[in-house]
Image: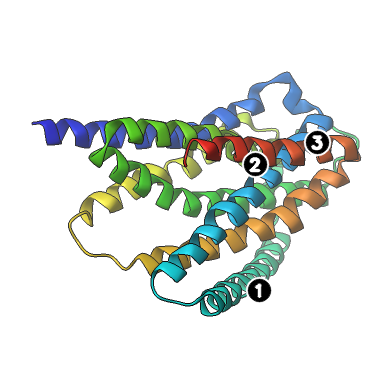
Amino acid sequence: MQADENLLFAFALTLLAGLSTGVGGLAAFTNFARKEKFLAFALGLAAGAMIYISFVELLFGALESFEDQGDDADEAYTKLAVMFLGGLIVTGLLGKMMESVTERMGINRSDLSNLTSEKSTDKKSRKLYRTGIVTAVALAIHNLPEGLVTFLTSMQDINLGIGIAVAIAIHNIPEGLAVAMPIYHATKNRKKALVITVLSGLSEPIGAGIAYFLFFQNMDPEAFEVVNVFVASIMVYVSFFELIPTSLEMGHGAYSKWGLIAGLSVMGLSMIFLT
């Protein structure tokens, strides 16, 4: 009976942590969401959050894991570098393919018909929309291991599980902004921005489901680290080649800069709760 209660509680914690991504998506419903200054800040904040997660949490964690599995420092670093750079190249090629496809197919014209900003153009709207979708996919993949960790930790220690779930929920909010704001500004469709944002967060309970079905099986930890390195390469690519350039194109460099600093700071503070 106690085990069943822990199981349900662990799933509930993981679901709530994932749904917190939608809190960031709710920003699309505020008056600030109509202002390009806020978009510039939000994109910078999202980029800072993703850069911090990638380098401090995912890549550094993978390097430590490779060393713990028996690789010496040079071997672990070489393995990490090859995987990371390879991931960047693959992501760049996929991004080029996606850009080509969206240019041929076009974005739904009804989604773009309500654009009101004089600075907005179809090309800019397509780029914002693509940025939001790519970010949503990257974060959905990133949230899978988060859900797995939250679930397994909660099954073993409820108090520790709560702490991890709260910390993950905190740093999921700027991730939600990263998805919602570009999509909202591209389509002026608040419902679509929120739905896509929530869907990207729901991969966390999916991760919990994976953890549940594989709970009693021996899993190769290196497989998870390979996924983490690839996810880090996706988020770094999105940050440096999509989020930051798009933020700067808004023409509000100060807001972009302080958004970037805020994103790094939020992630740094939230990670304190994970250690």
**Image quadrant where residue 230 sits:** bottom right
Q: CA distance from mark 2 to mark 3?
A: 15 Å
The three-letter amino acid code for the residue at tag 1 is Ile
Q: Nearer the viewer, residue 93 or 116?
A: 93
Residue that carries the numbered disc 1 in the rendered image: 89
Give the amino acid at mark 2: Ala
Q: Secondary structure at mark 3?
A: helix
Question: Against 210, is 12 above or below?
Answer: above
Per the rendering, the mark at residue 178 is 2
- Mark 3 against mark 1, which lies toward the viewer? 3
Mark 1 residue crowding within 10 angstroms, few (<14) / some (14–19) / many (20+): some
Marks 2 and 3, the one that precedes in the sequence: 2
Pick the front one: 53 or 244: 53
Write the residue at 71% across / 67% down: 100
Q: Residue at x 68, y 51 (%)?
A: 131
Mark 3, residue position = 258
Q: Is residue 39 visible?
A: yes
Residue type highlighted by circle 3? Trp
